[in-house]
Image (spheres, helix red, strand yellow):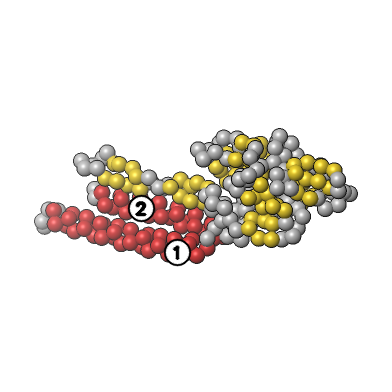
Amino acid sequence: MQSSLYVALSAQVAMEKRLNTIANNVANMNTGGFRADEVKFEEILSLAAKENVSFASSGHNYVSRRTGPVVKTDNPLDVAIQGEAWFAFSGPNGAVYTRDGRFKMNENGDLLTVEGYRVLDAGGSPIALDPMGGAPTIGHDGTITQGTNQVGAIGLFNLRNDSRLSRFGNSGVTSSIPGEVVQDFNSNGVQQGFSEGSNVNPVLEMTKMIAVQRNFDSAATTIQESESTFMDAIRSLGPST
């Protein structure tokens, strides 16, 4: 069997996954706090052939940690992170981290994400405001005050570079290693009245999509040529009639 046929097929599988990832990124380019998916590809050496043959694996997704653009909203419950930290909210199976700081308050004063999950403080406890206390003031370190009363503090967490992030909903991630509470607010903090958008670069993603589509077509051509060569060899080596 021709190794080139399998190499081209493995390339098509990898590029199909890349196309799906790009399409999902483009679909969420206006989702607040969305982190783009990237794909890491590896090579697999086949042991079936006498010579080494390199195949592309289907790849695995990882969540990009690039920061997104910050826009001014003047909403007192909108906060954008300055630095590399993350907010946390209470998910079904523990803490979920997000860069989406478009918060809201329910009738009980609970501070919630746009999806309705409870925002956590540095100790991992839900934050509750005074529903009759007026608009809150949120400091650089996440401290929340209403009038002269401090009612809580938004937790900020650092996620280690070696932690594996898995997507949760539109803009949340879970981490294989729990986040570490931010202690230094010189390099991290929050800015009230601002929100962070998606970190998807639509022009770059569309450029990637065009390149992947062209490579996919090139691999298809390689498969057709390999099949044609294989069939020609069968006809040439077959018994004469």
Local crowd size for mark 2, using a 10 Å CA cut-off: few (<14), some (14–19), many (≥20):
many
- Residue occupying the point 41% across, 55% down: 15
- 234 versus 128 height, above or below: below
In the visual, does 120 lie left or right of 110?
left
Q: Amino acid at mark 2?
A: Ala
Residue 135 in view of the camera = yes
Write down the residue under mark 2: 11
Going by the picture, which residue comes out furthest to the left? 240
Contact (CB < 8 A) between labels 2 and 1?
no
Badge 2 or badge 1: first in the primary sequence:
2
Residue 159, percent from left and from top: 57, 40
Residue position marked by numbered label 1 in the rendering:
207
Q: Position of residue 31 (x, y in %)?
A: 62, 57
Above or below: residue 153 compared with residue 30: above
Front residue of 235 and 21: 21
Residue 12 percent across, percent down from the top left: 37, 54
Of 177 and 67, which appears nearest the observer?
Answer: 67
Helix, strand or loop at label 1? It is: helix
Q: Amino acid at mark 1?
A: Thr
